[in-house]
Amino acid sequence: MPEILPVPLPISQAAIQTAQQFAQQQPIPVKAAQVYRNTLAVWVMNDYLQMLGVPTQLTASDSWNCVLRLCGDVADLQLLEIGKLECRPLLPGDHYCWVPPETWEDRIGYVAIGLDEVNAAANFLGFLPAVAHSEVALSLWRSPTDLFDHLAQLHPASTTAAPRMITLGRWFQGEIAAGWQSVASLLRSHQQTFAFRGNATLAAELAEATEFTIEQAKFITFPNHDSIALVMKLALDQQNVTHVLLRVYPLGASPYLTPGLALIVLDESGDVFLAVEATALNDYVQLQFSGTEGELFQIRVVIGADRYQEQFMI
Amino acid sequence: MTDLERLRQLVIEACQHSAGSPQRQRCLTQVIRLASPHLWREATPDYADALQQTWVYFCQNICDRGSGERYDPDRGSVITWLNTYLKRRLQDFYIARQRQQALQAPSQGGMDETRNRLDLIEQIAAAPDIPPILEQVQLWVEQDPTGELCQTHIQGRPDLTCQVLILRRLPPETSWKDLAAEWGVPIPTLSSFYQRQCVPRLRKFGEQEGYV
């Protein structure tokens, strides 16, 4: 069997502080130690996946839910649109990784994370797509890098068929796609119908000086969450490169976006190209990128189980 | 092949694939693995944070211009590039600490933090506050205001309800193995029931109580 090389990952001070805080909520020392290690394992994996462009939703994880981490030995990390990845901690000298029965279901995979608390260092030791045993010998785990092909297969974008596409080049010729309108007209048409407070931020948008020649907005409603406005601004430069700025504004009762709302841009092959997630204090989120004529991309906005998606060609 | 040559090849290969693709993620991970033993090391409290920032910078700028200048392989090896950034971050942290210490009492030393981590578990054990969440959950499960915790049970075993199982799994919990032996039910049956029937109700309770 080829030797599996671990991936060294730093344990930040924020990770340690959060782990201490979660541990202090526990009623007995043995449970506190378990929560402390689980939190560190989830945190380092979250840092690692985020920097590699895998969108995560840390706060939507069971391990970040104070009731569920009290009532179970859970170290899950919620991956946007994919599912829960269980991040099991190991201590120096452990030859087996403990995978408790309460994590055998509702997981898209398992990773083993070696913790060296003294040196504030962790090691991503291995990956398994499925586990149904409490003790899994380290020699049975697959290479950490196998995780990425597994995640790519699970991503919903790799299986969905391409829907209707909007050509942005036509917008410069004045042909705006159905469903899109100017920011001013969107505000006018919805101001009287609903008592939006989030409107204030969107209205401020109008006053902003901009080098973008096209500004269009779309009113998007969700079955389970507040409505939003998606604003797209376009500029064409002298090298024929189109610059795109996307913003999402709240249109509900709150002036802030729902925490966890994600704005995502996918490339031609459906891979995540850019993503941003709203926190509790965001009155808007934005993404900016450039492309040349004929390039394809998709915009996706996700809040919990609600989703908007539309496909574009530059 | 030396590590430096291998790293050079991995960087070229990584950048041939689109950002966020599994191929690039795989290559960047290989670089992290291979470059790590060659990076600058020091035993300071901010080292892990500086290193984490270095890896984020690496992922953002190795193939494209991101938060800073794009990495230029003609100007030096990846190791040199990473070490330059890492040392700059360490210096930033050092200066920030110096400033902080100048404002605070002179007795607070940064290295104490590292030492304190060692006896962390003891500190936690000594924490004086009794956490209220356990009591709240226990009370809710025992009272079962809607009656659903008592009504929902493992198929064919009316005695094994959500209420019974949650109470036995609250810390200090009885192990799955012991419960399986005591009740004569396989572990996967118990844990699956717990995940499907108990966890969603616990989650809902947490939301209602504003714990999340």
Image (cartoon, coloured by chain):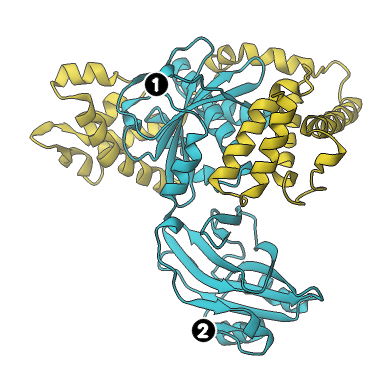
Chain colours: A cyan, B yellow
Q: Relative to B139, is A236 on the left or the right?
A: right
Q: In this view of the protein, which residue sits in the foreground, A62 or B33? A: B33
Q: Do tags 1 and 2 sit on the same chain?
A: yes
Indicate which disc, 1 or 2, sits on the residue closer to the N terminus.
Answer: 1
Identify the residue at horizontal 31%, vertical 43% (top origin). Answer: B201
| Mark 1 vs 2: CB contact within 8 A | no
- Quadrant occupied by the N terminus of chain B: top right
Q: Position of residue B55 (x, y in %)?
A: 70, 36
Q: Relative to A199, is A125 on the left or the right?
A: left
Q: Position of residue B6 (x, y in %)?
A: 69, 30
Residue sitting at the far front:
B1
Identify the residue at horizontal 66%, vertical 21% (top origin). Answer: A120
Q: Looking at the image, is B177 positioned above or below residue B150?
A: above
Q: Considering the numbered disc 2 on the image, is that residue within a helix, a strand or a loop?
A: loop
Q: Considering the numbered disc 1 on the image, is that residue within a helix, a strand or a loop?
A: helix
Residue sitting at the far left:
B156
Residue A97 in view of the camera: no
The label nearer to you, 1 versus 2, is 1
Q: Looking at the image, is B73 positioned above or below residue B109?
A: below
Identify the residue at horizontal 18%, vertical 41% (top origin). Answer: B152
Q: Looking at the image, is B136 positioned above or below residue A5?
A: below
Q: In this view of the protein, which residue sits in the foreground, A72 or A98? A: A98
Task: Please give the residue where the numbered disc 2 appears in the rendered image.
Answer: A193
Q: In this view of the protein, which residue sits in the foreground, A253 or A162? A: A162
Q: Amino acid at mark 1?
A: Leu
Residue A152 in view of the camera: yes
User: Disc 1 versus disc 2: distance between alpha carbons?
Assistant: 60 Å
Q: Position of residue B49 (x, y in %)?
A: 72, 30
Q: Relative to B168, is B49 on the left or the right?
A: right
Q: Amino acid at mark 2?
A: Thr
Task: Please give the residue where the numbered disc 1 appears in the rendered image.
Answer: A140
